[in-house]
Image (cartoon, rainbow, N blue to C red):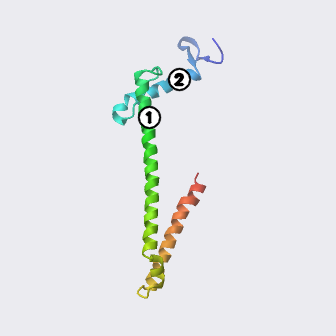
Amino acid sequence: STASAEHDVGEGEGTRRRTRGVPQGRAVAQSILDIMADAEHITKVPGIRAGTQEGSAEWVRVEKYHEERYKNKRKSFVKGKVEAIFWLLAGYATLTGTNFIEVIFTDARINRSFLNAALIGVALILMVMLYLIFWLSLVHD
């Protein structure tokens, strides 16, 4: 027996050999793959068994699923960015088309104390958001 792969455990009648290293890791990985394949009806994510040959029908089915999932995530990401740009442009067009900024600072009908309180509230909310987004992400990473 090789000293690096196996060693004796115990003495006498209950002596057995225990292997270390890769064989147990491989067995654990195989059992994880089998569990994932068995759980497909629950997770709706196709799993592949450890002994499946590359190019087999099962292999191709799992590959297609993950390729399709990647494409859908990418489409969703791009769609979200396009929508965000649209809403930013719509907001900008509304602000400039209605002269909103000019009106809130020059119109006599605006109650300045309420406007100032609202601007202070918005500034506080923005500061809390900046703290949560930037400072905590830097500190807790």
Q: Considering only order in the chain, which callout, 1 or 2, is on the residue closer to the N terminus?
A: 2
Residue toward you, 47 or 5 = 47
For the N terminus, the image quarter is top right
Quick check: 41 left or right of 78? left
Mark 2: amino acid: Arg
Mark 1: amino acid: His
> Residue at horizontal 51%, vertical 68%?
126
**Residue 34, how many percent across, how many down?**
42, 26
Q: Is residue 8 above or below residue 97?
A: above
Residue toward you, 37 or 28 = 37
> Residue at horizontal 52%, vertical 66%?
128
Residue under label 1 = 66
**Residue 59, how many percent across, how many down?**
43, 25
Q: Is residue 131 above or below residue 49?
A: below
Secondary structure at numbered mark 2: helix
Q: Is residue 34 visible?
A: no
Residue under label 2 = 26
